[in-house]
Image (spheres, rainbow, N blue to C red):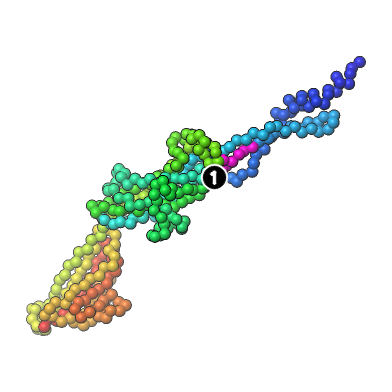
Amino acid sequence: MTSISEVHPAPDRAIRRGLMTRVIVALLPLSLSVPALAAGTLAGTDIQNTATATLDTAGGPVTITSNTTSIKVDELLDTVVIETTTGDVLTSPGKSGNIHSFRVTNTGNGDEAFALIVNTANGGDDFDPTLQQIIIDSNDNGAYDAGVDVAYVTGANDPVIAPDQSKTVFVMTTTPLGAADGNRAVMRITAAALTGTGAPGTAFAGQGQGGGNAVVGATGGDGSANSFLAVQSASLALVKSASITDTSGGQRPTPGAVVTYQLVATVSGTGTLNNLVITDPIPSGTAYQAGSISVQSSAGAAAPLTDATDADAGAFNGTRISVTAGDVPAGETRTVTFKVVIQ
């Protein structure tokens, strides 16, 4: 006679056999829900996983729960640096306060501090600018604000950047006096993760955010970008000439003769001369002829100017004439004329 126990195994043995045969197919991972970032799951996050197995028994459905595994996500050290200056930074020999703009982005998955290093001595260019200071955009408006943005001091205020966030950094340089018109120079900034840099995959045990390891990512844990200086050195030549018309229609400098002075200002090189003002004293032995000032640009006709200090560019103050020519680009001229009468 067959026993009931042989036909129907005891529930505990069936459960054990069921677990052995079903746990493999019923193992489904369960994980925490975390925001998806370009850099991946945040460093220090605990990824927990628990499996379950279910089976039917004579007593009804049974669910078995496995132990929970926990994995702490390591910090990935990655960064990208790009130049945000539009085109070359225009400069002139001896000019200080050249501003170069960069954006440093933490493409890793943990809050990370970055050291900022500038190299102005790069081969293959025409001159080496001098580093004045590195500046951090303290109000995060992307523009350099003197007296607001703060100077960077290595080890004192290294910028800490959250994952997928950026920080604008400015570099201020000076152009050497020996730089010539048309010369070009390159300066390079590097942002390096303070936790460490190196070959991708290099690990720093226990140094990641949240207590895990820190692992160097594809960028090597640092990023660099270049910015260029271009020298535009405009120069000015001022040539004065005089023509005479005497009272007889000749050209002799006799009393009563009218002398017409012509001042030709020529801007050469590249760039622009700013706030050009041309002045000329009235020579002794002569008297200024009222209303005789005019100015002519390279492409225009001569325009008469008033003697009063008013809205137009000309003025006579009793002892000299002046013409405000403004900003004059290289390759252009400004020609000023006025008249005096020999006494």
Task: Name the residue at the top extreme.
Answer: 1
User: Foreground residue, 212 or 173?
Assistant: 212
Q: Is residue 106 in view from this perspective?
A: yes
Q: How many marks?
A: 1
Task: Name the residue at the right extreme.
Answer: 1
Which residue: 12% across, 78% down? 284
User: Which quadrant of the rendered structure holds the N terminus?
Assistant: top right
- The prevailing secondary structure element of the residues shown in magenta is loop
Which residue: 78% across, 27% down? 15
Which residue: 24% across, 63% down? 267
The reply, left or right, for residue 188 in relation to residue 201 is: left
Which residue: 25% across, 70% down? 277
Question: Would you identify the image quadrant in which residue 310 lies?
Answer: bottom left
User: Which quadrant of the rendered structure holds the C terminus?
Assistant: bottom left
User: Foreground residue, 54 or 11?
Assistant: 11
- Residue bearing the label numbered 1: 38
- What residue range appears in magenta? 38-48
User: Foreground residue, 13 or 257?
Assistant: 13
User: Foreground residue, 108 or 250?
Assistant: 108
Quick one: SS at disc 1?
loop
Measured as percent of width and height from the top left, residue 315 is found at 25, 78
Residue 94 belongs to magenta span: no
Measured as percent of width and height from the top left, residue 60 is found at 83, 32
Density class for disc 1 (Cα within 10 Å; few <14, some 14-19, many ≥20) is: few
Q: Is residue 89 in view from this perspective?
A: no
Amino acid at pointer 1: Ala
The reply, left or right, for residue 193 in relation to residue 326 is: right
Measured as percent of width and height from the top left, residue 276 is found at 26, 68
Measured as percent of width and height from the top left, residue 151 is found at 39, 53
| In the depicted structure, whether residue 312 falls above or below residue 65 | below
The reply, left or right, for residue 330 in relation to residue 55 is: left
